[in-house]
Structures are given as structure tokens and as C-alpha cells.
Image (cartoon, helix red, strand yellow):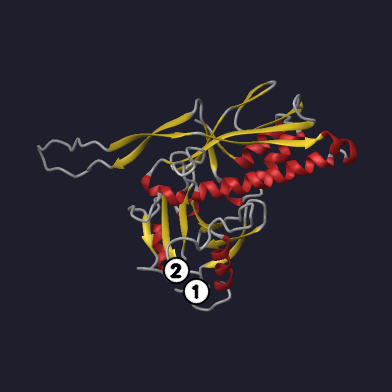
């Protein structure tokens, strides 16, 4: 199955002549650094079946005249169900008459920002059970504090330790350049301060990203900072046990950690991924409607493609 990041999809849809409204929505979603770099696998149907690696086969050597080891790796068949994200954007016809098309564009712009924030929020903190199946499960639920890929920064709670951060990065099976650290905005500010603090500043620096913008790195690992939600609360806040937060290390890519998206219907046919189109004036109310449709999910296909460091307090970073 093909996979493209939202940025790559945006570039492709420009070449395919997508509408200005669709491109505006796609551009708005790409403001999120996290959403921009996550690859999305195209899924046909409402779910994505996959084989989760459970245990590798043995590969022991043998002596002369012995049989070769024929043990097999074990996998578990799993499936991720796509969730229905989207929005109906409505504007009163009287507002359009009095204030022009800018009234509808304002609502569309606000909706784009809300969708971007919701994607980040659910990718990190979503809970399918708690939302009656509406949300996708986020990283916090997928890597709970009792799992093998969850590491304690401190026995109960304490400032982020760079030594423990090294262990987190090492727990993910991928080259350093293929990994990212996902950090909340409040803790991200601690990295900025650490750059100015002797003893912890050595491996933290700014480097240009793919657009030439300065981005935080820890060694060769890029640091992605998540945003706030629509009510201006940090998505990765100090809201876990003992007023702590978590950092996640991810290996992004097909077969590792990726997003999922299915096709959407429009009045002119089916399109892959996100769809944006005008429905027009409603029959029951004097409103003009634009519909946004997006069927998405997320998946961790290899256990060591993601890890979590928890029990981090709101204190300065230490070595």
C-alpha cells in the first residue's frame, strides 16, 4: 500500500488541480509539524488488517551433521478501524449577503485549525473506548505505563533526565535519523532553556528542517513539539499521575508508526483521503454548507517502533 505524508499529498493535489478550498484545508493541516511528517497509508474499506510482530524466530548456529534451526517468528493478526473525522461548515446566507464570502472563509479557517488540533490531540491522547468508538486510540493508551516499551524517567516523578532520554531513543529500533521525539509545548520550552545551560546543552541544538526553518534536535533525533487544543490547553500537558507528562520516540514509516486514511466521496466521485466540497444552500435553513470528510486512523505495526518515557515533572532538564 502506498503511503504519503500530508505535505506530499498537498503537493500532489496541487498538480492534480484540486479546488482552492481543498488546498486551503490541506495547507492548514500542514501547519502541524506532527501531522506534516506522519506518513498516511491508503486503506480500502473501513479497517486496516496487519500482522503485528510478537516474537522473532531463534537463529542459533549448529554443529556438523545437526539440522538447521527451523523455528518461526510469531505474529498476531490485528486490525485498526478508521474513524470518521470531518466537519460541516455552515454560514448564514444573510451574513454572506451583508459581509461577502469572507464570512464563510472565516468559519472555514477556524474549522481547519480545530481539525489540526484535534488530530494532534487524538494521535497522542485519543481513547476509542471512552469516546464510544469515535476517536482513534492515541499513543498514551497504546503504550501504557505497564508495557515493555514504557520507561520510567523516575521512580515516582522527577525532572527529565537526558540519560533516560537516551534510553528512550535506544528502545526504538531504527537509525537515529529515522526517529523523532514527540514533546509537549510546555516541556519543549525546557529544551530551549537547556540549550543555554552548561552541563546539558551539548546535544541539543537547532537545525534547518525540510523548509529551512529552525527545528530542535537532540543529537540526530528531531524534536517535534505538539500544539494546544481548541481551548488553548497543551495537548501534552503535565496532567498524568503526580502532575507529570510523557515524551514519545517514534520510528515513522510504513510498517512502523503511520497514519491511515480511507477514500472519501464527493459529488464528482471518490477521492483518496481528504475531501472538501461545497454542498450549497440547505433546504431546511438559510445556510450555505461546505463539507469536509476525512476517514483516518493510526497504527504501530512493530512493537519497537515506538516507546514512551513517563514520570516527567515540570522542572529544568538534568543530565
The answer to whether 169 appears left or right of 20 in the picture is left
Report crowding for label 1: few under 14, some 14 to 19, many 20 or more residues within 10 A (C-alpha): some
Give me the C-alpha separation between circle 1 and circle 2: 8 Å
Quarter occupied by residue 75: top left
Above or below — where is 110 with respect to 271? below
Which residue is most to the left?
65
The numbered dot on residue 57 is: none
Which residue is most to the right?
98
The answer to whether 279 appears left or right of 139 in the picture is right
Q: Decide: marks 1, 2 in contact (CB < 8 A)?
A: yes
Query: Which residue is pictured at 63% across the width and 46% down the height?
Result: 116
Query: Which residue is pictured at 66% across the width and 49% down the height?
Result: 31
Front residue of 290 and 255: 290
Query: Which residue is pictured at 67% across the width and 57% down the height?
Result: 213
Report crowding for label 2: few under 14, some 14 to 19, many 20 or more residues within 10 A (C-alpha): some
The answer to whether 16 appears left or right of 229 in the picture is right
Q: Is residue 30 visible?
A: no
Q: Is residue 41 visible?
A: yes
Kindly identify which residue carries mark 2: 162
Q: Earlier in the sequence, mark 1 or mark 2?
A: 2
Above or below — where is 218 with respect to 35? below
Kindly identify which residue carries mark 1: 200
- Residue 283 image offset from top left, x and y in percent: 76, 24
Query: Which residue is pictured at 60% across the width and 46% down the height?
Result: 36
The answer to whether 120 appears left or right of 145 in the picture is right
- Residue 201 image offset from top left, x and y in percent: 53, 73
- Residue 121 image offset from top left, x and y in percent: 55, 50
Front residue of 319 and 126: 126
Which residue is most to the bottom?
198
Amino acid at each position: 500500500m502506498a503511503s504519503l505524508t500530508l505535505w506530499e499529498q498537498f503537493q500532489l493535489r496541487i498538480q492534480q488541480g484540486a479546488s482552492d478550498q481543498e488546498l486551503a484545508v490541506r495547507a492548514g493541516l500542514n501547519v502541524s509539524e506532527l501531522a506534516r511528517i506522519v506518513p498516511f497509508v491508503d486503506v480500502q474499506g473501513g479497517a486496516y488488517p496487519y500482522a503485528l510482530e510478537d516474537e522473532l524466530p531463534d537463529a542459533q548456529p549448529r554443529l556438523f551433521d545437526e539440522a538447521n534451526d527451523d523455528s518461526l517468528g510469531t505474529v498476531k493478526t490485528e486490525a485498526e478501524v478508521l474513524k470518521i473525522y470531518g466537519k460541516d461548515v455552515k454560514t448564514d446566507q444573510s451574513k454572506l449577503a451583508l459581509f461577502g464570502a469572507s464570512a464563510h472563509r472565516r468559519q472555514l479557517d477556524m474549522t481547519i485549525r480545530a481539525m489540526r488540533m484535534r488530530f494532534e490531540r487524538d494521535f497522542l491522547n485519543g481513547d476509542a473506548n471512552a469516546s464510544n468508538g469515535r476517536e482513534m486510540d492515541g499513543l498514551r493508551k497504546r503504550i501504557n505505563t505497564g508495557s515493555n516499551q514504557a520507561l520510567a524517567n523516575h521512580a515516582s516523578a522527577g525532572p527529565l533526565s537526558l540519560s533516560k532520554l537516551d534510553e528512550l531513543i535506544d528502545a526504538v529500533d531504527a537509525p537515529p535519523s529515522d526517529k523523532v521525539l514527540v514533546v509537549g509545548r510546555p516541556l519543549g520550552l525546557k529544551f530551549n532553556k537547556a540549550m543555554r545551560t552548561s552541563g546539558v546543552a551539548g546535544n541539543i541544538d537547532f537545525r534547518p528542517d525540510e523548509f529551512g526553518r529552525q527545528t530542535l534536535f537532540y543529537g540526530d533525533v528531531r524534536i517535534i513539539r505538539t500544539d494546544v487544543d481548541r481551548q488553548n490547553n497543551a495537548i501534552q500537558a503535565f496532567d498524568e499521575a503526580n502532575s507529570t507528562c510523557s515524551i514519545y520516540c517514534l520510528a515513522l514509516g510504513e510498517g512502523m508508526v503511520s497514519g491511515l486514511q480511507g477514500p472519501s466521496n464527493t459529488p464528482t466521485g471518490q477521492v483518496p483521503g481528504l475531501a472538501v466540497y461545497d454542498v450549497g444552500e440547505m433546504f431546511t435553513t438559510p445556510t450555505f454548507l461546505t463539507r469536509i470528510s476525512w476517514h483516518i486512523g493510526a497504527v504501530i505495526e512493530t512493537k519497537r517502533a515506538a516507546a514512551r518515557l513517563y514520570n516527567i515533572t515540570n522542572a529544568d532538564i538534568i543530565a
